[in-house]
Image: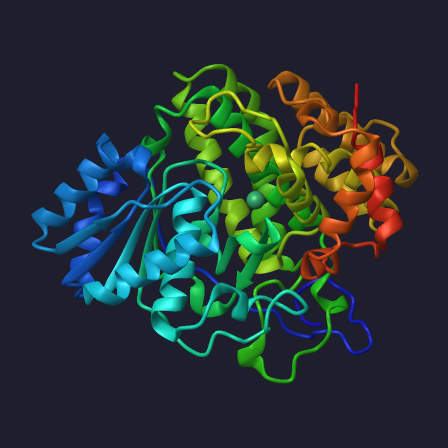
Amino acid sequence: MGCQYYAPADGGAQNFSVFMPRLTFGRGSLAELGIRCSELAFKRIALITDPALLDGPLVALARESLSSAGIDYAVHSEIRIEPCDDTIQASARFLQAGKFDAVVSLGGGSVIDSAKGALLLAAHGGTVRDYLAPPIGQGISVPGPVLPHIACPTTAGTGSECTPISVIRINEFETKFVVCSNYLMPTVAIVDPQCCDSLPERVVASSGFDLLSHALECFTARAYTRHSHVDNPAARLPIQGANPFSDMAAREALDIAGKYLVRGVRDSSDTSARDKLMWGATLAGMAFGNAGTHLPHALSYGVTHLMRDITTEGYPVPSPFVPHGISVIVTSPAVFRYTAEAAPARHLSAAAALGADQKGATPDDAGEVLAGRMIELMKDTGMPNGLGGVGFSEQHVSALAASAERQKRAISNAPRDSNRVDLENVYRAGLSYW
Ligand SMILES: [Fe+2]
């Protein structure tokens, strides 16, 4: 197996690919937007953002940069948090009508994911459901390239600028599903930590746990050699399981989250910590875009499907709303207690990277050590105490598991197999932690 360390498995993949945009990171890099468009010979841009950002300084900076470079552009801001298939269809119509030669997305994960979905439908037609895996969708593979995409994140969590994945709520099912294709990888990512300077503490906390969970899930995902071999190399998807590249990015992201998450949440003036979290989010995105997430993200879609009468501080969104990072983290400690037995060394390494005290820990302690460190970070950043903290109780466990069970691709990327009863047990164990 050459230079890398995963053992081969019968019928398993023997190769992994690395999928990446061309990336620029650092304070002030958003001002380079116009130049980046010019060097790629773009003449007319669709600038996609959301209503909250539309009249703010970041969109103004992007407009100025495009204008200075002589780039023609039109703005589309009808993007909602947690975009749905109707939003994507409307955005695709905007792209089709505008005769653009590229798209710039400026916003959080919702904006970047909307741009990916709109690019797909604008180029190839159909509906979002056509491209979802069965039994929800038709399982149609994205047939070819879409317009170039420059992704500019304004939160430190999504990592979507480095993934070919779009998460879209399907209204008919009242929950989110994943569209994934190599063709949806942004062409260019511009990651400017300055974009996060004015984020409220609660947004930093939620998006920080999203990055932490991306890294943890990728690091503990099923090894790529345990996923089936794909005969056609062009059909090799980025959700390919843990591999040496994703491990490298995830391990560094975990180190950053362990050191800087609490600091970045507690002190909005701590730009050193917040800038590092932005880099951690990008690294975790690289991991996520090359390995795929597993149970915490699968279970989070059950949470957002069934949430009721819940509002969340720091977000201008009506009830019911649980921010993505919180929907992920409320079950994560219970998930890792469950998955640790399948890969104890990996869980212990992840805990060590997060800064856990693991003196004397044995493989049997791996789940507890990792869950303990996560719970410590949750308490230190004012996270809800498990599912109970976002309005769920024992009576909801069965429906949550039935909802999450539909996320087959993510569930099959976990290191340990699970059935409906296992999912119910994990949700039950995640009702409260302290
Ligand atoms: Fe996420």
Q: How many marks?
A: 0
Image quadrant holding the N terminus, namely bottom right
- Residue 287 in sight from this viewpoint: yes
Name the side, left or right, on which 307 lies relative to 333.
left
- Residue pushed farthest front? 172
Check the image and report above or below for 385 versus 224.
above
Q: Whole-percent x and y of residue 361? A: 87, 32
- Residue 27 in sight from this viewpoint: no
Q: Whole-percent x and y of residue 175? A: 60, 49
Q: Whole-percent x and y of residue 396? A: 78, 36
* Rendered image quadrant of residue 40: bottom left
Check the image and report above or below for 204 versus 328.
above
Tell which of 313 and 63 is nearer to you. Answer: 313
Which residue is at a point 58% across and 26% down the rendered structure image?
259
Which residue is at a point 68% across and 61% down the rendered structure image?
409
Q: Whole-percent x and y of residue 386? A: 73, 27
Name the side, left or right, on which 361 lies relative to 137.
right
Image quadrant holding the C terminus, namely top right
Question: In which quadrant of this rendering is ligand 1 seen?
Answer: top right
Which residue is at a point 29% across and 45% down the rendered structure image?
77
Name the side, left or right, on which 219 lies relative to 165.
right
